[in-house]
Amino acid sequence: MWQVTALQITHCCLMSDRVFLMSKKTETKERIIIPFCEIGRGDRFNEIQPETLPKFDPEEFCSISDEEVRDLVNRIKESVLPLIADMMKIPHIYKGIMATDLFSLNTLLGSTVEVAVVRFLNENRDLWDKDRQWVDCRFVRSSEFFPDVRLVNKTTGHIVFGIELKSWFLISKEGEPSFRYRTASKACSPADLICVLPWYLSDAVSGNPVLIKPWVYPAKAASEYCKRYWMYRKTDVPLNIDERSVTEPGDIVLYSNNREKANYMPKKDSSNNFGRLARTGLLDDFVSESLETDILGIPAKNWMRFLKIHTDQKSLYAIQKEIDRIVEIPKSEEFCRLIEELGKYINMLK
């Protein structure tokens, strides 16, 4: 599926001798690194030489033939979704949440955030349909479908394109979006998008949900990238290309009402890690930038670390040692109040 140039093949053949590295942990196990051109031999390997991997070009998977649809999708992707953080407000206020329950907030409130985004899109049509060209269309959400948000013609039922929304509670324990994106490439239209929505509570541990700038990417390209990562990823245990393979479901149709039937199935995935898009490297810059978000004068990543310490069932002494390791918290006008509030959470554990 990824094109390999003659130069790459020549380069691979010249490097046909395997590279073995000793494991740092045991110094007895050999780490097998091979060039890309050797993966078809059926031998097991730990990783592929990075310089021999074919380049991934997302543009190969998101060419939209219909000019009107292409203009609409580009407008939504580049001009509308990025405005959500500045223009959309979620009035609901949440308080009295136990510190140990905060990490489950995305499960509890994630759908609320996603529903609010759909409402925002429909209520602000002027942002994406100034000429009233799509007046018969409306965004509709259903978590059972892929994509879970679709622009549908109310008269004909025709689906123009879809957006797969994934909310991410910014101070969640994982420190990255933890959703699985398993949808097969053939189940995605070139016009479809995937959008990750980072959010936090206005007072860190309470308040109303606040969104920050989302990550938006072609859904079809993200699917291809996820599959590529899984097949060519580094592994501790050597696997051959067949053991790394994923099966594409048969009879795939666009905009099926059964999400599961549109998913890839990895041949070996005992840890249930296939589809963890945040672990592929595709979102690295976005995640790093998002975790620097200022929440009441403290970076989101420090809130996450602090709360994680208190939910790992450690002793108070161990908690204090972990807190000392956290990057120094900058003082602000809210500093004293925040320290007092955080102190209450510590006292609750005594």
Image (cartoon, helix red, strand yellow):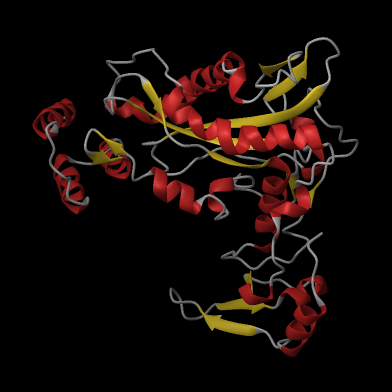
- Which residue is at the front of the view, 333 or 135? 135
Quarter of the rendering containing residue 302: top left
The image shows residue 21 at horizontal and vertical percentages of 54, 82
Residue at 80% from the left image edge and 23% from the top image edge: 159
Residue at 32% from the left image edge and 44% from the top image edge: 301
Q: Is residue 125 above or below residue 17?
A: above
Residue 49 visible? The answer is no
Q: Quadrant of the N terminus?
A: bottom right
- Which residue is at the front of the view, 186 or 28? 186
The image shows residue 102 at horizontal and vertical percentages of 35, 27
Q: Is residue 259 above or below residue 267?
A: above
Residue at 81% from the left image edge and 26% from the top image edge: 256
The mark tally for this picture is 0
Quarter of the rendering containing residue 260: top right
The image shows residue 168 at horizontal and vertical percentages of 47, 34
Q: Is residue 273 left or right of residue 218?
A: left
- Which residue is at the front of the view, 339 or 265? 339
